[in-house]
Image: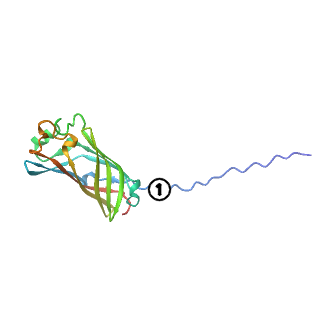
Amino acid sequence: MAQTKPAAKPAATTTAAPAAAPAAAAKLIPAQSDIGFTFRQMGVPVEGKFKKFDAQLAFDPKNAAAGKVSFSIELGSATIGDAATDAELVKPDWFDTKKIPTATFQSTSIKALGGGKFEVAGKLSIKGQVHDTVVPVALTQAGGTTTATGAFAMKRLDFKIGDGEWKDTSIVANDVQVKFKLAITGMGPL
């Protein structure tokens, strides 16, 4: 009786499903964005801003809880529009930019509040001091650009900003208001 070899198994064919196109990454548009701060010096409001900053965004407004946001701000880019004062800001008593040139914010949770409003909780780090911070954010969208606006208060002495002789809050107040307007491309719809 002749033995027959079993028929060769047909080669497995796998038809890979086409890979879904990755979602466009949300990106900050620095030229259209602002991060500013206001404090009082001898009772008079003083406004400043940071000229250099960046953000990494992994955020879908429809799934806010899964989002992650991080910022880095070059402290040496701070300006209040006066060259002599700006030169002081980089020194050890203020931002100490030679030692720690960057401030950072890293989100730990994002909560949707409805109507394009969100609450971003995270860790704010300035001059090696890290504090929990909650930042309210409102989003609006027009023409493919998402604009994130918000403001929060902080205490400069919590971060050792204005150390040494500058700890006296009767000259430079402890309260600082930080406000921002960030232009972002590639974010999903609200």
Instruction: Decide if residue 30 is on the left or right side of residue 174.
Output: right
Rendered location of residue 6, percent (x, y): 80, 48
The tally of labels here is 1
Residue 51 vertical position relative to residue 119 in the rendered view, above or below: above
Instruction: Decide if residue 160 is on the left or right side of residue 169.
Output: right
Rendered location of residue 92, percent (x, y): 18, 35
Q: How is the image coloured?
A: rainbow
Quadrant, the C terminus: bottom left
Q: Residues within 10 Å of mark 1 (few under 14, many from 20)?
A: few
Rendered location of residue 11, percent (x, y): 69, 49
Residue 99 vertical position relative to residue 2 in the rendered view, above or below: above
Rendered location of residue 183, percent (x, y): 28, 56
At 38% from the left and 57% from the top, the residue drawn is: 64
- Amino acid type for the residue under numbered disc 1: Ala
At 61% from the left and 55% from the top, the residue drawn is: 15
Secondary structure beneath dot 1 equals: loop
Residue found at the very far right of the displayed protein: 1
Name the residue nearer the viewer: 54 or 69: 69
| Residue 149: quarter of image | bottom left
Residue 61 vertical position relative to residue 7 in the rendered view, above or below: below
Name the residue nearer the viewer: 28 or 148: 148
Residue matched to label 1: 21
Name the residue nearer the viewer: 13 or 62: 62
